[in-house]
Image (cartoon, rainbow, N blue to C red):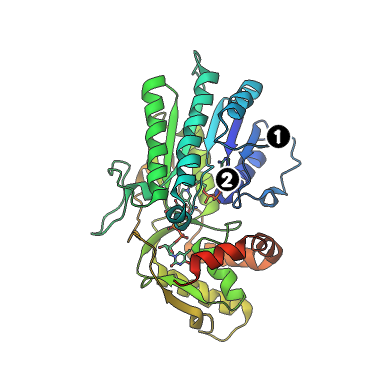
Amino acid sequence: MTKRKILITGGAGFIGSHVVRLFVNKYPDYEIYNLDKLTYAGNLKNLTDIENAPNYHFVKIDLVDALALTNLFNEHQFDSVIHLAAESHVDRSITNPLEFVMTNVVGTVNLLNAAKECWKGNMEGKLFYHVSTDEVYGSLHDGGFFLETTPYDPQSPYSASKASSDHFVRAYQNTYKIPVVLTNCSNNYGPNQFPEKLVPLFINNIRNNKPLPVYGKGENVRDWLYVVDHARAIDVVYHNGKIGETYNIGGFNEWTNLGLIKVICSTMDKILGRPVGESEKLITYVTDRAGHDLRYAIDANKIMKELGWEPSLQFEEGIEKTINWYMDNQQWMDEVTSGDYANYYDTMYKGR
Ligand code: NAD
Ligand code: DAU
């Protein structure tokens, strides 16, 4: 197997930590560098099991710091990048769009520039893998699925910033001949997700008998994929994806928010030994998210047929595994919900 020196960005976050773990454990001959700014969403405790592995290295850098990126590339001469670092929460992007422009757009362009300069004159064996989202395609209203060819139609500041970064990645391939590959994935769930997102937030609130804030009528639809299956897909695309291609990743697993919330509630009742229906009583309808996308649904046939990837877990198994992880790791949850979290929660949900 060819040795690789890979820069993975955002490796202390939710999906990034699963990607780093997979690569560090599965490819002991690869050198894995995890670059992360350690924002509120970055947590090195997500990686304690592999932090001492000889092929794992951590660097604390902000993607907005172009000089630090150039110096890092000069020092380590990476042959590939898997770029996950981003501001990732839609509600925060509505409150503070500029932060999303800085990290997701400026940060991505800085990273592309550092790779371009380092790889100048020899693009052989190089790869810039950009991890993106299905939200760039907008909102589905009349059935159908997002294909790789679906025109971009981002509707939130978050998805607009991700769409912009996707365009820059493709433009750098066209203009500077950087070998790139992109994936656009649907909603992930699983261990280590910051409890601002629906699944861990609701698990934590049920555990603490707090209201479950359902936006609007809870009729919005999302397509849920277990995070380790996303990491497995990234492994497959990194090794076998065709340069210049985009692959959509999803689980063909659509749920209305209310449907998903009811599964979480009944599983929590079972695990906590509460009477059937107890957790559902916490459901509280609150003011909708501004510009809330109605439905996302990925057609994942391309990656399945061309690269042989498919999800390994059925949803019922995945969600039970996920809930059990949060119940078994209450200290992780307590730590990430201490400090600034209470302020965040008050600001985001008070008066909704
Ligand atoms: P996350 O918010 O959990 O983690 C993001 C990580 O990026 C954190 O560790 C954070 O510290 C780091 N980061 C943020 N700004 C940075 C900066 N300026 N410089 C360096 N590091 C910085 O995000 P996630 O949910 O794991 O998402 C990872 C990627 O996958 C993102 O690009 C996101 O758009 C994409 N994605 C997420 C989902 C999902 O359901 N969560 C689905 C599809 C695609
Ligand atoms: O589709 C991929 C995207 O999925 C990723 O690109 C994003 O990074 C990720 O955050 C996720 O975006 P969503 O907005 O779909 O995820 P979130 O968990 O924030 O919300 C899921 C659904 O639940 C959405 O319809 C809004 C709703 N919701 C969310 C929260 C936090 C509520 O009803 N109440 C809540 O408190």
Q: Position of residue 42 (x, y in %)?
A: 62, 49
Q: Position of residue 5 (x, y in %)?
A: 62, 28
Q: Is residue 56 left or right of residue 112?
A: right
Query: Which residue is pictured at 37% across the width and 52% down the height?
Result: 156
Q: Is residue 214 visible?
A: yes
Disc nearest the viewer among 2 and 1: 2
Q: Quadrant of residue 179?
A: top left
Query: Which residue is pictured at 58% across the width and 58% down the height?
Result: 194
Disc 2 under 8 Å from ligand 1? The reply is: yes
Local secondary structure at mark 1:
loop
Q: Cβ–Cβ below 8 Å for labels 2 and 1?
A: no
Q: Position of residue 213 (x, y in %)?
A: 47, 72
The residue nearer to you, when weighing 333 against 243, is 333
Tag 2 residue: 16
Q: Is residue 241 above or below residue 191?
A: above
The residue nearer to you, when weighing 266 against 304, is 266
As drawn, the label of residue 220 is: none
Q: Amino acid at mark 2?
A: Gly
Tag 1 residue: 55
For the residues labelled 2 and 1, the Cα–Cα distance comes to 16 Å
Q: Amino acid at mark 1?
A: Asn
Q: Dot 2 surroundings within 10 Å: few (below 14), some, or many (20 or more)? A: many
